[in-house]
Image: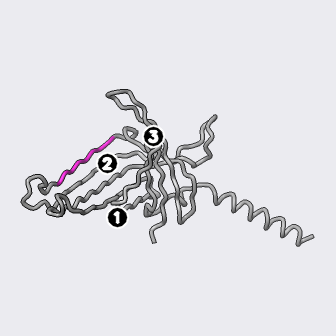
Amino acid sequence: MKKIIFYSLSASLTILLLISCEKPTRGKVTNKWNVIFDTEEIDGFTSVDNSITSNRFIIDKDGTWSWNKSGSTSGVVFGGSVFLTNKKALTQRGTWSFIQKTKGDDFKKNERILFNILFESSVASQTGGGNNPAFPDTTITDSHTYLTGEKAMIYTITHSTRKELWMESESLHVNSSNGQVSSKKVRLRLEANK
């Protein structure tokens, strides 16, 4: 009899642990993540930026986050007479929170995350043009601050463990000049920083 009770409790505990492993929790989301998969699909066309060499997404327990990505490309133009290097960096920071389940939606508790973007900056540079006036060395910087809720990203968590986090975002965008609607889907796969 004791064995039956012991095995029943063990099986129940195992099932409970397996079920709880599937739920996204603050402990599974907060980490210093390396973004190992970052695709953007607009109106059915998927693009991957292969020039990105550093892509870090940090989600802190205090409700803040930051995303830093940078990369570069190099190549020759004019039949090899000019060698150019283009570098770019993007930084975003803000606050995050789980979007709670509401009546009538199909989402589970803690399945969606709202990332409020409070600060965003970008730097793009081109070097190597030498004396060629068509390719001057340039640096363009841009930065913006936003109010909470003014610019945000909503991601659905599709997989979460302490070592991996997969998220997707779907949205519609309306072109203000012609009214054309386009769909956008972003997929991220994050791996815990080692």
For marks 3 and 1, give the CA distance.
26 Å
Residue at horizontal 13 percent and vertical 57 percent from the top: 137
What span is colored magenta in the figure?
139-146
Tell me the number on the disc at residue 53: 1
Quadrant the C terminus occupies: bottom left
Query: For this view, does 6 lie left or right of residue 126?
Result: right
- Identity of the amino acid at label 1? Thr
For marks 2 and 3, give the CA distance.
28 Å
Query: For this view, does 179 lie left or right of residue 104?
Result: left
Q: Which residue corresponds to mark 2?
A: 119
x%, y% of residue 127? Answer: 16, 60
SS class, disc 1: strand
In this view of the protein, which residue sits in the foreground, 145 or 153? 153
Tell me the number on the disc at residue 43: 3
- Identity of the amino acid at label 2? Phe
Query: For this view, does 46 lie left or right of residue 89?
Result: right
x%, y% of residue 145? Answer: 29, 44
2 or 3: mark nearer the eye: 3
Task: Name the residue at the front extreme.
Answer: 79
**Dot 1, how many residues are within 10 Å of its Cα: few (below 14), some (14-19), or many (20+)?**
few
| Dot 2 or dot 3, earlier in sequence | 3
| Dot 3 or dot 1, earlier in sequence | 3
